[in-house]
Image: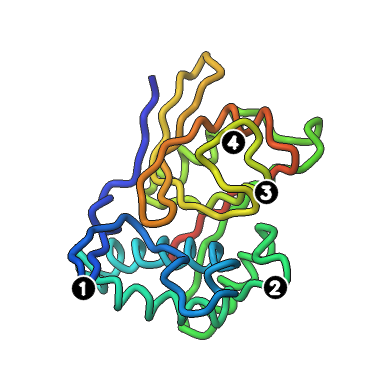
Amino acid sequence: MIVQSIKHLDALKIQDDTTGTVYYGCNQEWYGTKWQRRSGCGPTTSTTILQYLYATRKNMVPTLQTKKLCLQCMEDVWQYVTPGPQGISSTQKLCKGLDAYAAAKSIRFQTDVLDIPRCRTKRPALSSVLSFIESALSKDVPVAFLNLHNGKEPALDAWHWVTIVSLEYESAGRTAFTGILDEGLRKNIDFAVWLRTTALGGGLVSFDFA
């Protein structure tokens, strides 16, 4: 069994300023407008990963953040990773927004992308996809995962971005499980089932400070 994960999951803990509830990663439901709450999974996932990078690379984020501070960051990221009529519906659109954010903040990102096409015959093999995820996590980089259709994986919402923080698989088998952050919660999905059964595909993006 091969297991890989980010090193500091606690850096993604967020505490509600009012109730004291602790979440993992940001939640698009925290946005102030209906449109943001409906379409904001791309900027929300981007914010979660940015918060992790700032915390682990630059020591700019406390171990236990507050919901209020995270929402401020979510609103800031929204200005650059801005959903269109179909949200952030491709890895290219997410990367374009991240490039705009980086330019505005005078920083640079090293970005890696793996697209998973709608056409099943053109999709990368499971081993290639797992290698991409494992490589990012081994560098302590969470992975943004776009799922356009959840197939037979019930724990995923369609047309949605989430953050991958861990991976567990058998090198000779057909099973692979990823730990994700979504809606402020930790969840587990069968990534191999998703790859086999998604009707529309999606993609993966990893980025780190260059």
- At mark 1, the secondary structure is loop
Whether residues under marks 2 and 4 lie with C-beta atoms below 8 angstroms apart, the answer is no
**Residue 85 x/y as whole percent:** 73, 71
Tell me the kind of residue under disc 2.
Answer: Gly
As measured in the structure, the alpha-carbon distance from the residue carrying label 2 to the one carrying label 1 is 32 Å
**Residue shown at the point (66%, 35%) measured from the top left:** 151
Which mark is first along the chain, 2 or 3? Answer: 2
Mark 3 or 1, closer to the camera: 1
Examine the rendering and report whether any part of residue 210 can be seen. Answer: no
Whether residues under marks 3 and 2 lie with C-beta atoms below 8 angstroms apart, the answer is no
Left/right placement of residue 194 relative to residue 162 reads: right
Tell me the kind of residue under disc 4.
Answer: Val
Q: Which residue is mark 3?
A: 148
As measured in the structure, the alpha-carbon distance from the residue carrying label 4 to the one carrying label 3 is 16 Å
**Residue shown at the point (42%, 63%) measured from the top left:** 27
Mark 4 or 3, closer to the camera: 3
Q: Which residue is mark 1?
A: 18
Q: Residues within 10 Å of mark 4 (few under 14, many from 20)?
A: many
**Residue shown at the point (59%, 74%) measured from the top left:** 35
Q: Which mark is residue 129?
A: 4
Tell me the kind of residue under disc 1.
Answer: Thr
- At mark 4, the secondary structure is helix
Which mark is first along the chain, 1 or 2? Answer: 1
Which mark is first along the chain, 1 or 3? Answer: 1
